[in-house]
Amino acid sequence: MVRTRTRPLPAGKLDPRRALAFGLTLGVLGTIVLWSAAGGAAASIALAAILFYVFVVHALAQPRHAVRGWSWGECRARSLR
């Protein structure tokens, strides 16, 4: 994407494996800390939010055809009414 091409990962300044390891480490440690501080329910919700962001939001953020983008926006706008 034009907007993000100068960021460290797309520009090749950061190793993708190290970025993945860093993200996984933060996710695991954050979930453990939340579990110990607030309990299993809060940690489960946080873990679900992380997984939703990684697998659903990321998939929707990929470049797509204009009609598909328009139809997603139209469906979203109708659901908010």
Image: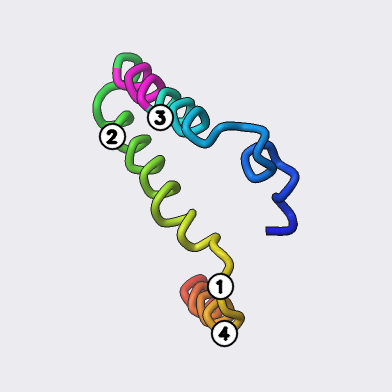
Instruction: Please tell me the numbered disc located at residue 24.
Output: 3
Estimate the x, y position of residue 56 in percent, counting from the top left. 41, 56
User: Quick check: is 58 in the magenta stretch?
Assistant: no
Q: How far apart are marks 1 and 2 (CA)?
A: 31 Å
Quadrant containing the N terminus is: bottom right
Dot 4 or dot 3, earlier in sequence: 3
Q: In which quarter of the image is residue 30?
A: top left
Residue at (49% x, 63% y) in the render: 60
Instruction: Give the class, few, some or many, for how many residues have Cα within 10 Å of label 3's Cα (few <14, many ≥20).
Output: few
Disc 4: which residue: 67
Dominant SS in magenta: helix
Range covered by the magenta-colored residues: 28-35
Three-letter code, disc 2: Ser
Three-letter code, disc 1: Arg
Three-letter code, disc 3: Leu
Q: Nearer the viewer, residue 6 or 67?
A: 6
Classify 15 as above or below 54.
Answer: above
Disc 1: which residue: 64
CB atoms at circles 1 and 2 under 8 Å apart? Answer: no
Instruction: Please tell me the numbered disc located at residue 44.
Output: 2
Q: Distance between the residues labelled 2 and 4?
A: 36 Å
CB atoms at circles 4 and 1 under 8 Å apart? Answer: no
Identify the element where label 1 is drawn. Answer: loop
Q: Is residue 21 toward the left or the right of residue 6 in the image?
A: left
Of badges 1 and 2, the one in the foreground is: 1
Dot 3 or dot 2, earlier in sequence: 3
Estimate the x, y position of residue 26 in percent, counting from the top left. 45, 24
Classify 3 as above or below 27.
Answer: below
CB atoms at circles 2 and 4 under 8 Å apart? Answer: no
